[in-house]
Image (tube, helix red, strand yellow):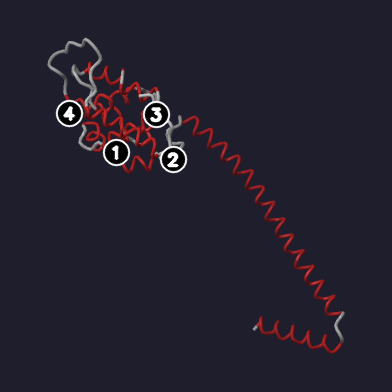
């Protein structure tokens, strides 16, 4: 679990253990890890579900409906074992983090791992609430999506200020360019006039006639 963020590691370890004990289960399954992910509030997972418009309480209710509670509290002498499916989800989460070029595995990668493990309880609950793998991958391409709202608002203000400054610079650049184009036109006209004045009289007449003919063709 060295590659996992503190929040993600907690979900697999202490958080998952606590969820399993709460439901009087003698194993830690994907459903317990998902409950642990949701319990860490406020956190990245809570913000993710909020922005996906998924009510975390509905996730918890669906899990409780599916797994129920144990008949009696098991005798826990040591930490509860992770199921093979949970270990597989951890591996898939590492793979998702690498795909997205993250150095650390965070809770969003764990949730992607749940979804890739299509037969797990966590995956079935998420899909039933409208969260699917491709949608979530697309959603997470936005690097700001999991920032706290106050940070997003501050970044938006900074971007607006920067954009305003760039707009002013753009206007200045456009004005300068327009002025430059006018000056180039004036310079070309001046050069043409000087060139014409330097021509021999006969050549000058032919040149001016051609210009006149071209201008009349353009107008027509």
Label 3 Cα crowd, 10 Å radius (few <14 / some 14-19 / many 20+): many
Cα distance between the residues tagged 1 and 3: 16 Å
Residue situated in front as seen by the camera: 173 or 90: 90
Image disc number at residue 44: 3
Mark 4 or mark 3: whose residue is earlier in sequence: 3
Disc 4/disc 3 C-alpha distance (Å): 25 Å
Left or right of 103, for residue 49: left
Is 179 located above or below residue 159 in the figure?
A: below
Image side of residue 96 versus residue 205, left or right: left
Q: If you read the primary sequence from the N terminus, does the residue marked by circle 2 or circle 4 appear first?
A: 4
> Mark 1 — residue?
131
How dense is the environment of label 2, judged by Cα within 10 Å: few (below 14), some, or many (20 and up)? few
Query: Is label 1 in a helix, a strand or a loop?
Result: loop
Name the mark on residue 142: 2
Depth check, front residue: 17 or 152:
17
Disc marking residue 73: none
Q: Position of residue 63 (x, y in %)?
A: 22, 28
Of callouts 4 and 1, the N-terminal one: 4
Percent position of residue 173, x then y: 69, 53
Provide residue 71's location: percent of width, then percent of height. 12, 16
Residue bearing mark 4: 66
């Amino acid at each position: 679990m060295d590659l996992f963020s503190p929040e993600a590691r907690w979900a697999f370890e202490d958080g998952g253990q606590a969820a399993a004990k709460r439901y009087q289960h003698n194993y830690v399954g994907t459903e317990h890890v998902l409950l642990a992910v949701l319990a860490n509030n406020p956190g990245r997972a809570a913000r993710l579900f909020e922005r996906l418009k998924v009510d975390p309480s509905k996730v918890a209710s669906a899990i409780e409906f599916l797994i129920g509670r144990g008949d009696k509290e098991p005798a826990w002498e040591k930490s509860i074992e992770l199921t093979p499916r949970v270990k597989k989800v951890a591996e898939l989460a590492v793979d998702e983090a690498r795909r997205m070029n993250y150095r650390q595995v965070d809770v969003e990668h764990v949730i992607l791992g749940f979804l890739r493990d299509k037969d797990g309880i966590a995956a079935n609950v998420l899909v039933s609430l409208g969260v699917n793998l491709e949608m979530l991958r697309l959603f997470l391409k936005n690097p700001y999506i999991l920032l706290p709202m106050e940070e997003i608002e501050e970044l938006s203000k900074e971007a607006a200020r920067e954009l305003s400054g760039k707009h002013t610079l753009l206007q200045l650049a456009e004005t300068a360019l327009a002025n430059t184009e006018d000056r180039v036109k004036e310079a070309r006209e001046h050069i043409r006039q000087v060139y014409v004045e330097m021509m021999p009289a006969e050549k000058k007449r032919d040149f001016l006639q051609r210009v006149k003919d071209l201008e009349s063709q353009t107008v027509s």
